[in-house]
Amino acid sequence: MLRLCLATQNRHKVTELRALLMACAPELENQLELLSLSDLAVVDEVVEDGATFAANAQIKARAAALATGLWALADDSGLQVDALGGAPGVLSARYAGEPRSDARNLSALLAAVAAVPAEGRGASFHCSLCLCSPSAVAVDTYLSEGSVSGSLLTVASGQDGFGYDPIFVPTEAELHAAGLPLTLLGQSFAMLSLAQKNQLSHRTRAVRAMLPNLIALVAQQNA
């Protein structure tokens, strides 16, 4: 069995990544042991100072791989708002400053777009994943990307999800592409069930793009 470190202490991301990996590749269930930084008692002190999601994912994956001696999978994701020139972007998790708070980030973003009309509230979620070997050399580093388009509500709606999920509504085209019923149109990510969200989320798309590398890695481990 391959032990894989999920390079995060964010329990929401751990839950989503575990669910996504098993849903997208059920054949890996008995071949992949997924461990978070918390499971491995590793303190996450890495400085995420990359200019892009991909750069931050690489920083986190490399640090986790070196700290644990395991293959590491890191996620860096966030919300890009058209009216704010792509902000909060890589600063999504700390948009309202430190200490990090989903509630304060949400309030700060709603205030920033309060005067923006409905037709100008376009936004997208983006996710970059990086898979890095324990040696942390570039030749054994793999990247994948995923994004989903939508718009922002004026008030938070829904009790599930995390981060900016309560104000992000996927477009009709995204629902259709994911095979979800159009009765869900207008519902935020936080109003969708986890299964529904996972059908079209940015993280799902990045995981699917990464799967060939993970499957090949497991096969190599078992050879």
Image (cartoon, rainbow, N blue to C red):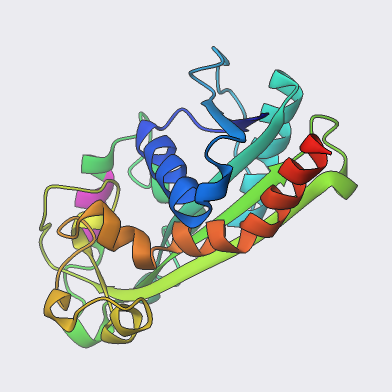
Quarter of the rendering containing residue 179:
bottom left
- Decide whether the magenta segment is chiefly helix, strand or loop: helix
Can residue 6 be seen at all in this image of the molecule?
A: no
Q: Which image quarter holds the C terminus?
A: top right
Which residue appears at 16% of the width and 78% of the height?
Answer: 185
Seen from the viewer's position, the closer of residues 90 and 8 is: 8
Seen from the viewer's position, the closer of residues 208 and 65 is: 208
Quarter of the rendering containing residue 145:
bottom right
Counting from the top left corner in percent of width and height, residue 156 is at: 12, 57
Residue 128 horizontal side relative to residue 124, left or right: right
Which residues fall within the magenta stretch? 105-110
Image height of 203 relative to 136, above or below: below
| Residue 109 drawn in magenta | yes
Residue 199 horizontal side relative to residue 146, left or right: left
Counting from the top left corner in percent of width and height, residue 65 is at: 72, 29
Which residue appears at 34% of the width and 80% of the height?
Answer: 174
